[in-house]
Amino acid sequence: MEVPLLVDDFLRRAVQVYPDKTAVVDGDLRLSYRDLQRRVNQLSNALLGLGLVAGDRVCILSPNSHFFLESFYATSQIGVVLVPLNYRLGPSEHEYILNHAGVRAVLVDWEYTGVVDEIRSNLASVEHWIIASETGEAHEGWCDWNALLAETACSPPPDPGVCENDVVSINYTSGTTARPKGVMLTHRNCYLNAYNMIAHLGIRHEDVELWTLPMFHCNGWGGVYALTGMGGTHVVLRNVEAGQIFGLIERESVTFACMAPAVLRTILDYNGRDEHVITSRPRFAVAGAPPPAAFIERLEQELGWRFVQIYGLTETAPLLTVAHPDHNTEAKDYARRSRAGVPGIGVELAVLDDEGQPVAMDGQSVGEICARSNVVFKGYYEQPDQTEAAIVDGWFHTGDLAVWDETRCIDIVDRKKDVIISGGENISSPEIEDMLYRHAAVLECAVIGVPDEKWGETPMALIVLRSGRLPSEQDIIDFCRERLAHFKCPTRVAFVRELPRTATGKLKKFRLREQFWQGEQRRVK
Ligand code: AMP
């Protein structure tokens, strides 16, 4: 009989092999793997007690915390699907996702209950409201997580008979459409991604991972499963702040962290670093955007720490490629190491032109990266047309444009999809344009990504005004900030006479972008 690949194996193994080892450090709280499993079982039993059944959706809205980590295993081991929410979104964006996913219970950090209370009356499917807080302070309308656990058995819950192709999480991404899409990841996707992380990033039981990456972001790039499987220690960080990062790396002898280039910059620019004695030589995996070669050089030369770049998407659970110094690369060839890298095990990649033919492996011919692998997602939740558009003949089309060479090393140079990546967060241009069109003065608009010193890219709005209307740039920015998550709002605005269009009326965004990217080797940052 085949044994299914289920992510719960990771925690089960860690508890059997390393019961007394520290699993999680969260502020002053330390939980062993035995403690973690007890809390996970209690939450599973509590959710079952509330009437949840396999296939139901439960969301978590929280910064990184031990609660967040517990929610992964407590839901999956009873077949419940976890919907992690991006805490940077605003109430109306949460409302859309919670309703679209038909969530029955919400697990919310104390800091975010106010956001959920604002939309509570519009959330018809939600029946249970659970608040995560260390203090246990009462909040009207909320049931305390720890109090719920105190009343519940810590024995393992009954086996729900989950299959490996069942969905374990729905991760909403801001993609090419005005509304976020729900990426359905299966146990099999996440299991195999975790194996790839272990193999390619060399995750070991001695590893102590600092959570600089939000856990909501594609299961923390799979780190939740990979590190747990190996019995490593999770050091969770609520707010990403350089002083705290250095303090925790020193105190906990951190060996590994995964982050967006914007966080790496904060670390490199921190001027209090000489106050810390760090002997663990952590290795940093950077994802989300190509980091400048200078960042890699500074990390390795100034700090003596190690760097590896990875590339992937929520839709691929996420790891597709890894750029490692061992891959035919001199360690000091920083420019090459800032490329996305070579395919991971079990990942077949193609770089295809507009006719669907592979482009030459000459490091110059540009095409779209397509992937075939067991890490490719099951589909977009309740959006079969979007799924069909994304997976064609078994190949997932990433929307990323790249060149590759004869070693199959991928360098991402542009994006086919209308997405801006700012500080590691995806922003859909159509979503911002949609909002701008609600402004009375806007006749036509286009939102593009332009290079930004701090965030890599930042959204810029190009606007044709209605005659007689004269808003200021700040008026436009404020209008967006009142209605959209702040990270999505344009930081630059330009009023133009007209927008360039093709004969069929399609916006020529590449023309608009070109002027802002002159002198840059790539059209992504
Ligand atoms: P998400 O689904 O939010 O993880 O975003 C996936 C997108 O992030 C990809 O389609 C790429 O455009 C971008 N991305 C991720 N990793 C890298 C990388 N190493 N280099 C360049 N772009 C990246």
Image (cartoon, grey):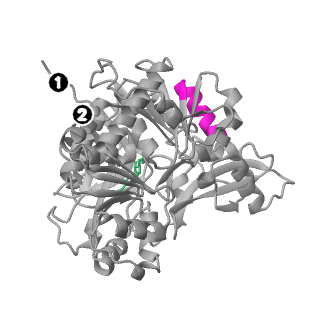
Assign the N terminus to one quadrant of the image.
top left
Q: Does label 2 point to a residue whose CB lies under 8 Å from ligand 1?
A: no
Magenta range is: 91-105
Q: Give the residue number, with chain letter if any, for mark 2.
A: 9
| Residue at the far right in the pictured view | 468
Examine the image and state in which quarter residue 521 appears: bottom left
Give the alpha-carbon distance from disc 2 to disc 1, as whole Å.
Answer: 11 Å
Relative placement, left or right, of 223 versus 268 is: left
Label 1 Cα crowd, 10 Å radius (few <14 / some 14-19 / many 20+): few
Q: Secondary structure at mark 1?
A: loop
Q: Amino acid at mark 1?
A: Val
Residue found at x 66% / y 38%: 139
**Looking at the image, how many numbered discs can be counted on the residues?**
2
Where is residue 199 shown, x and y percent of the image? 18, 50
Decide which of 312, 191 is in the foreground and name it: 191
Relative placement, left or right, of 59 versus 251 is: right
Q: Give the residue number, with chain letter if any, for mark 1.
A: 3
Q: Does label 1 point to a residue whose CB lies under 8 Å from ligand 1?
A: no
Main SS of the magenta segment?
A: helix
**Along the polypeptide, which appears first: circle 2 or circle 1?**
1
Where is residue 506 shown, x and y percent of the image? 57, 43
Q: Are marks 2 and 1 in contact (CB under 8 Å)?
A: no
Residue found at x 87% / y 54%: 468
Decide which of 215, 494 is in the foreground and name it: 215
Residue found at x 46% / y 76%: 270
Decide which of 389, 81 is in the foreground and name it: 81
Q: Secondary structure at mark 2?
A: helix
Decide which of 485, 360 is in the foreground and name it: 485
Examine the image and state in which quarter residue 208 appears: bottom left
